[in-house]
Image: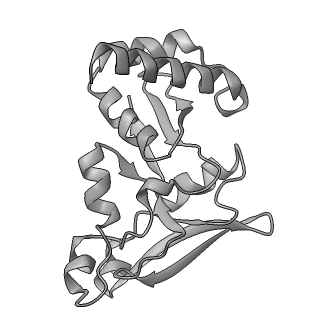
Amino acid sequence: MNKKQRDGLLATLRQRFETHPERHPGISWEQVRQRLDAEPKALDALQAMESSGGEPDVIARERESGVVTFCDCSEETPAGRRSLCYDGKALDARKEHKPRGNAIDMAQEMGVELLTEQQYRELQQIGEFDRKTSSWVQTPADVRALGGALFCERRYGRVFVYHNGAQSYYAVRAFRALRRV
């Protein structure tokens, strides 16, 4: 990322941070900026989140370590990450109509992680997300070993956790990313 792109991303992140203070009460932009300056590689991950439609914003800061957590805060699951099956094993298992990729590998390439079910529920406490879409979440090994994967969505004012075959993919399902800085 060149200086102009870096400055543009920082300006976007700051504007979003200032526009949505309810997502990060008690956290200042200066604290966030210090963390970003100390870990410049994190900006690459945040740029990947931004460019795929995630609209990353700060949702937490650890008191002791100062680690800041960014999460996708787009109203719906990020458009640039949709139509993915869950992981590489699921992608390999598809013989016909393969999706363009999988959520686990894409997250790794971006330098981020999928939310857990608990993190997804916590995110829903600060806003209403995925009212028309759904997001893959980290799936427990025992569920994955049986061929399944979990996804979440918000409907009727509640968060629902569902399952699908890990090889399935839908135009309205992607994944929400998390990056600690």
Residue at 66%, 54% in the rendered image: 129
Q: Please say if 28 is above or below 132.
A: above
Q: Is residue 144 above or below residue 24?
A: below
Q: Nearer the viewer, residue 24 or 14?
A: 14
Q: Quadrant of the N terminus?
A: top left
Q: For the point 46% across and 63% down, which residue is it? A: 174
Q: How is the image coloured?
A: one colour
Q: Is residue 12 visible?
A: yes
Residue 51 location in percent, x, y? 42, 41
On the image, which quarter does residue 33 sit in?
top left
Residue at 80 percent across and 63 percent down: it is 157
- Left or right of 127? Residue 65 is left
Locate the C terminus by quadrant.
top left
Exactly how many numbered labels are in the figure? 0
Pick the front one: 173 or 147: 173
Q: Is residue 158 left or right of residue 52?
A: right
83 above or below 72? below
- The x, y position of residue 115, in whole percent, is 46, 54
Q: Position of residue 99 (x, y in %)?
A: 32, 75
Tell me if I can see residue 115 in this picture. no
Q: Residue furthest right?
A: 156
Q: Quadrant of residue 81?
A: bottom left
Q: Is residue 63 above or below residue 134?
A: above
Residue 112: quadrant of the picture = top left
